[in-house]
Amino acid sequence: MVSEVTDAVDTRGSASVLLNGLHVLEAFSIDQPVLGVTEIARRVNLHKSTVSRILATLEQAGYVEREDAGGRFRLGLGLIALAGPLLADLDVRRVAQASLRQLAERTGETTALMVWNGHESVVVEQVPSPKQVKHTATIGTRYDTYESSSVKVFLADLPVAEVDRLFERRLLAGTYDEHTVESYVSELQQVREQGYALNDGRTSVEEVGVAAPIRDHRGEVVAAALLSAPRFRVPPALLEVLARDVAQCAQEISARLGSS
């Protein structure tokens, strides 16, 4: 009997914590996408310390992210992993599907659409390779390794100071020091100039990744087209060919989004 009562209390407590977390997420809106702890606490009728603990947990999971040093937050793209059916409402995803499918058919390799959540590249669409041996990732998969090709594409579009901040806060995975960062920043300049980024076995000796930026009508990078393949199938000469294919795919999608 005591055990049943304890289980019931635990269940109610867990449900209460979950509901409080959902209420915190629901406090954000289109009109007010950025909120501070005090604002959220007022909206959900919880103590500020409770809201702070909830936000810390949600931030670790990628469901919210810090907007600035003042302690304000906005929703994070980690929610995409929970909202797969709603991804069809992402304009860039709808626009990109045909081009990604054509790229996969043309190259025989897996293609994907990536978006940036502030320190990670997130898979929001994928067309798997028709071949038996292939590299794939489920929608919602996140990449935070600085050597990842899609991560390079997004970082190349950021100010150098912001890239330095991500390294300083250890938000990018991988082994690096001051000299590594300096060399990497130079590599990002090359990515900007050539219009694509390569990952030739740097994060996995068995995989090759090629990514290119997708821009909207404002010229801003809103996504990246990615091609991934087993490394044994991509000799150096073919890597450059695939890079041009991916860049062309990204340009096609960008044009549909109104980029000039």
Image: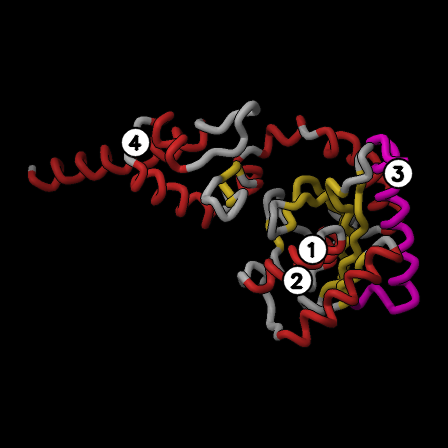
User: How dense is the environment of label 3, judged by Cα within 10 Å: few (below 14), some, or many (20 and up)?
Assistant: some
User: How dense is the environment of label 2, judged by Cα within 10 Å: few (below 14), some, or many (20 and up)?
Assistant: many
Q: Relative to 217, does residue 177 appear above or below in the rendering?
A: below
Give the label, 3 or 2, closer to the camera: 2
Q: Quadrant of the N terminus?
A: top left
Which residue is the site of mark 4?
46
Q: Relative to 207, does residue 48 appear above or below in the rendering?
A: above
Q: Relative to 157, does residue 80 appear above or below in the rendering?
A: above
Q: Quadrant of the C terminus?
A: top right
Whole-Å distance between the Cαs marked 2 and 1?
6 Å
The residue at the point 49 percent across, 41 percent down is 64
For this view, does 80 lie left or right of residue 149? left
Residue 196 drawn at (x, y percent): 83, 55
Which residue is the site of mark 1?
151
For this view, does 104 lie left or right of residue 22? right
* Mark linked to residue 176: none
Q: Which residues are magenta?
A: 231-260
| Residues at marks 4 and 1 touching, judged by CB atoms closer than 8 Å | no
* Mark linked to residue 252: 3
Chief secondary structure of the magenta portion: helix
Whole-Å distance between the Cαs marked 4 and 3?
48 Å
Give the label, 4 or 1, closer to the camera: 4
216 within the magenta span:
no
* N-term-proximal mark, 4 vs 2: 4
In this view of the protein, which residue sits in the foreground, 45 or 249? 45
Whole-Å distance between the Cαs marked 4 and 1?
37 Å
Residue 137 drawn at (x, y percent): 64, 50
Which residue is the site of mark 2?
146
* N-term-proximal mark, 4 vs 3: 4
